[in-house]
Amino acid sequence: MGEHPLVDRVRDIGPLAVAYSGGADSALVLAAAVRALGPERVLAVTAVSESLASGELERAARLARDLGVAHLTPRTHELASPGYRANGTDRCYFCKSEVLGTITALARDRGYDHVATGTNADDAVDPFRPGLRAGAERGVHTPLRDAGLGKDAVRRLSREWALPTWDKPATPCLASRIRYGLEVTPHRLARVDRAEVAVRALLADAGAASPDLRVRDLGDTVRLEVDPDAVDVVAALPGLREALSGAGFADVPHRVEPFRSGRLNVEPHSHP
């Protein structure tokens, strides 16, 4: 049995830096690069900013270390962009412009002319992916998309390669929890992060879990989205109201509903 087409695709690119969030997609690209090129010809770069959820950097660093890859963690400044803070439907474009601009410049300084992202074949046909334009403008490579690997195929191959990310729930940036039209601020990002950490802790104390969990800041309300079978459990958690208040959502009414990925993309947008 020959090597996977993904490995062949990465080998064709040559030495490269991977824009590596630590999620299933970018982790698979990183692992494929190590198989194709050897760890010494691969660079992992994780952008660190206020929009990175707690715990993500540590998990990403662990896998990069296990793969033997040099791992850089530059600070990025999405909040300096008015387009990002305005939180229109094109927010991801401004975010990715900052992140990929930083990563490509850093890679070039280290002698890497090529940068790859974890964009997969499903992302390529998703109408809510304005960030893809930022990648195209910078000529970044998308080996998962090139090899025709969608989300399910990414998880299957990751499991086959024994990557710990094979069943990792999607963890998009914290700004994706804020309803479009509400300004993205350090305060809003931090309280969403604190609230998600607090709710997970309450679930753990209750002997329950919800792999998918989002705290959506809707402005006048906060919506907790959890796995459908965990809705009643979360709604009845002792101390839930206090945990949300302590995280920064004092006096903001909350409700608990089933999780749906990308839900804010299809809901009416608020206006500042």
Image (cartoon, grey):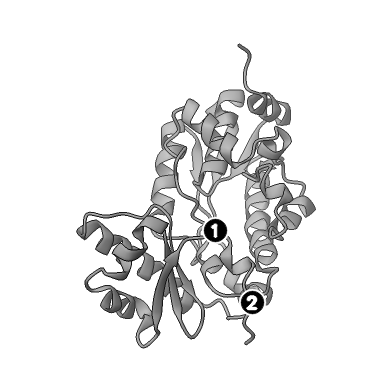
Q: Is residue 111 left or right of residue 197?
A: right
Q: Is residue 230 left or right of residue 16?
A: left
Q: Quadrant of the N terminus?
A: top right
Pick the front one: 188 or 49: 188
| Quarter of the rendering containing residue 268 | bottom right
Which residue type does callout 2 highlight?
Answer: Pro
Of callouts 2 and 1, the N-terminal one: 1
| Quarter of the rendering containing residue 225 | bottom left
Which residue type does callout 1 highlight?
Answer: Ser
- Which numbered dot is residue 268? 2
Picture layout, residue 156 above or below residue 190: above
Mark 2 burial class by Cα count in 10 Å: few <14, some 14-19, many 20+: few
| Residue 227 visible within the image | no
Q: List x then y, in percent, for residue 114.
A: 70, 40
Picture layout, residue 258 above or below residue 109: below
Q: Quadrant of the C terminus?
A: bottom right
State the residue position of label 1: 261
| Residue sitting at x 63%, y 64% | 95
Q: Is residue 203 left or right of residue 75?
A: left
Q: List x then y, in percent, for residue 237.
A: 25, 68
